[in-house]
Amino acid sequence: MKSLLNIPIVFENHQPSEFLKKLSDYFPIVIQSRNVFQFENTEGKGQILTLVIEPGFEVELLQLHFTEDLHIHPKPTEQNSRWNVSICNDYIYPGELFDFTPNNYPYCVVLSSSMANTNRIFPANKQIFSFSLTFSKEWIEQNVIQDLKEEASERLNEIIESHEPIFMMDNVDIDLHRIVETLLNEDLYQQNTKLLFYKTALDLTLTFFKKIINKSIFIPSAQNFKKRDIQKIQEINEAILKDLTKPCPSIEELSKAVGMSTAKFKTLYKAVFNNSVYNYHLNERLVQARKYLQSGKYTINEVAYMVGFNYPSSFSRIFKKTFGQSPLQYMGLHYEEDQDEKS
């Protein structure tokens, strides 16, 4: 086996299988299952999961630890034939590539095209985490763009039709962080959790492209939004969502808390989350309520109070308007599904 010291791993950009193949020159790779690979020697250890969701759509999960710095040099392609979305530790890309203000999450989100020069360093004696989705250009066109409305389709098409290398980094926000937490709270490498990756990959895809379309991530500097202001908006939103039993604070209270005028706060919040504070907060309450109802542990009245509604009748009315079912109908549907699974 070769030594990692001062020798970069070079492979074709956005080809997870090629990275794994090159890594095997340095480590004895053990196949744990069809999609999971492990390695360990004196220079490092880790687990890698690679999974083809369908042709043109692949998942890669890296959890690594090295005793020497590992330099990764993907070779750019001549055209942007493949695209990659990664949630990873925010220290694995050279610092000069980004200028965002670190937030409470130890991750960043990266969008890159296969033409991009995306050299990375996996530093020694740190836990490396990276969850990546790789798409072919054709997959995005067939599975995302064609289902979008005209304006959204133009926004995304403008990105993937670029003939220049594209590399963008930004903070992970609360929605993307929740997806990471879903992964980290599971026993990822058990065969019976394979479906988790399908679901998580699709959740991340939907969330990510929605943010791209709504310009709530990789916000262009031309909009004159300071990164620190965006950071403040994300932090205050996270604070609101920590206790959904409390009513949403007023715009005046929130704007004062972050040192902005109410007009600037509303404009920036809308740009980041593509929604008003009240509607975003209400949606989160209802999503949480649905989880409580699905668990079968609580009555409808209990759930209403748990997500901050003073009147269960108001909760039921808004729930039905949002989801097309009353809370009682929703509980009945999931009760029947549970019975079907048990039979």
Image (cartoon, rainbow, N blue to C red):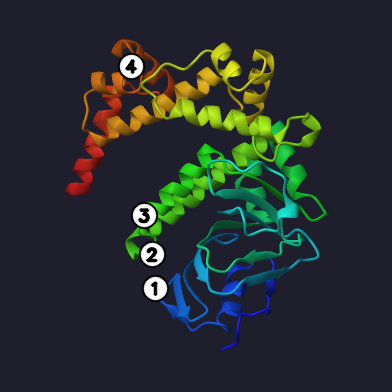
Q: Quadrant of residue 164?
A: bottom right
What element does badge 3 sit on?
A: loop
Residue 85, x across and y down, in percent = 62, 53
Q: What residue did someone put label 1 on?
A: 33
Q: CA distance from mark 4 to mark 1?
A: 46 Å
From the image, state whether disc 3 or disc 1 is nearer to you: 3
Identified at 75% across, 53% down, the residue is 96
**Mark found first going from the N terminus, 2 or 1:** 1
Q: Is residue 26 left or right of residue 304?
A: right
Residue extending farthest bottom: 1
Q: Are marks 3 and 1 in contact (CB under 8 Å)?
A: no
From the image, state whether disc 4 or disc 3 is nearer to you: 3
Q: CA distance from mark 2 to mark 4?
A: 40 Å
Q: What residue did someone put label 3 on?
A: 186
* Residue type at the position of mark 3: Glu
Q: Quadrant of residue 294?
A: top left
In this orientation, does residue 50 appear? no
Residue 45, x across and y down, in percent = 47, 74
Q: Are marks 2 and 1 in contact (CB under 8 Å)?
A: yes
Residue extending farthest left: 343
**Mark found first going from the N terminus, 4 or 1:** 1
Identified at 66% across, 27% down, the residue is 271
What element does badge 1 sit on?
A: loop
Q: CA distance from mark 4 to mark 3?
A: 33 Å
* Residue type at the position of mark 2: Tyr
Q: Quadrant of residue 314?
A: top left
Q: Nearer the viewer, residue 58 or 269?
A: 269
Q: What residue did someone put label 4 on?
A: 316
What element does badge 2 sit on?
A: loop
